[in-house]
Image (tube, helix red, strand yellow):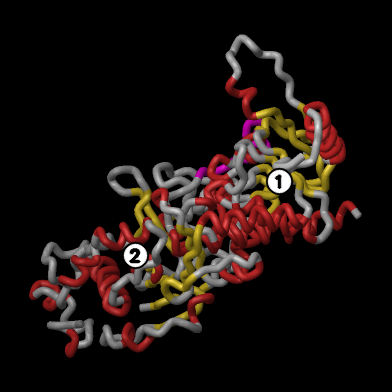
Amino acid sequence: MKIYIEENLWDSFSFFDEIRALFNFTVEFKKYRFRDPYFLAYIRVRNPSERVFYEPLPLEIENEKRDLIQGVIYDGVELLKYFSQSIDISKPAVLITNRLIATPGDDMRYHLRMIVMSAAAVISLKGILYAPAKPPEYYIKSSLGFTEKIDIDVRKVLRMLILQFYAYFEYEEIFCSEKTCILYNCHTTEEINQVKGLCKKHVKMLEGVINPSLELRIF
Amino acid sequence: MEGEIFAKTTEKDVTSAIVKSFHSMLIEYTDSDVIVVGGGPSGLMAARELAKVGKKVLVIERNNYLGGGFWIGGYLMNKITVRAPAEKVLDELLIPYQEYTKGLYVTDGPHACSKLIAAACEAGAKFLNMTTFEDLIIKERRVSGVVINWTPVQALPRQITCVDPIALESKLIIDATGHDAFVAKKLEERGLLKTRGYGSMWVEESEDAVVNHTGEVFSGLIVTGMAVTTVFGLPRMGPTFGGMLLSGKRAAEVALEKLKGFE
């Protein structure tokens, strides 16, 4: 498995050992850089309720070159497509980025995502913080201008997402219906807190692949 | 006479004092270095920074009062929040504040707003309030002035149609008209720019985004403040104002750089 870390995140990324410890096989880490600032500026999400792309302004392209991308959200499908076309996807490959990614939901509005996956996967570290729905108090305080601390175990969620992609890539297993299973598709912080480890079915499925000491209660 | 406090004057002198001084100001500012459209926090900040270094700056404000939303924080409560490093602007303007949590500061809206207005005035910026921006002057694909009219003209009955505006020229225009981005939208009407519309509120990152995207979006037009979110499709900020102040400063920096081309 190859884990690509976006270049601007590499120095501050602190989960190398945790990811390595997940599997019985070697996980290779590599730096990744998007080579096309125009494309990144082009695939920005502009309107939460419309999937439409605009010719970028020169300042947007300039800001992409300089990584001045706070507050910017990217279309996750397009970002994943670009990433997938730039690497070898015959083996599982994941890009970990600090960019925020969103994809349209059933309501046709964009929703922030922690992960977008297909033949490869893009995981957004920032998305792990912002995408899951929080308790109502968080939004009330935020709306009044107060920056509320987001209480999420990033390490736990990152490992969950990588295993979810791996299960999908190797076994075509799309999530688990057990709320306590690592492969459960969590949408809220409460759901993340309920996850305890792999369920029996998925322990069996991943037997021999994941680190045996982690099988029953990964976290 | 006993009890008489004020100097003697006549009605005609009062009237001519108003007319003459306004007239001479308007004549002088038919041509400026920079016209700032919108007298909210980002517009005032940009005007102050530019006037402070000797640039000829005119602020157009459609309301009678200046300050935009800077008088009041969220939910009609008149407390203003800024996040570090914007408290340095409060220091600079001698606005008292308190640290609420690490890096988050609270100040009184009326105090902060009146100080910012005073700072822009004292720096030498001039103002046309009760004045509505109507259109742009565009020459050779470059913005080079604004078309304005009195705000009350908009409220006239439809039968009265011939109330023509006037035009003012300037080297640069700054769009500080908030979410409406009126100036940028005028370019959009002509197919010269495509604004994206602002997204959902996101206090934490939108302030950085607004400051980083403050800049020239069309030859001669700089956007600042919440107009930036509309032009670039960025999240809006919520009731916190540091981004407005720093965006105004950034707009002034960009303008100063562009003005070098006219020297």
Identify the magenta region: B187-197
User: Do marks 1 and 2 share a chain?
Assistant: no
- Residue B34's place in the image compared with B112, above or below, is above
Q: Which mark is residue B263?
A: none
Q: Is residue B77 visible?
A: yes
Contact check, label 1 and label 2, Cβ < 8 Å:
no
Q: Amino acid at mark 2?
A: Met
Q: CA distance from mark 1 to mark 2?
A: 41 Å
Name the foreground residue: B70 vs A173: B70
Q: Which mark is residue A114?
A: 2
- Residue B174's place in the image compared with B257, above or below, is above
Residue positioned 56% across, 60% down in the render: B243
Q: Percent from the top left, x then y, of residue A55?
A: 60, 46
Q: Is residue A117 visible?
A: no
Is B22 covered by the magenta stretch? no
For label 2, the crowd category at 10 Å Cα-Cα, with few meaning under 14, some 14 to 19 and many 20 or more, is many
Residue A138 is left or right of residue A214, and the answer is right
Residue positioned 15% across, 77% down in the render: A197
Element at label 1: strand
Residue positioned 59% across, 41% down in the render: B181
Return the residue found at the far front: B2
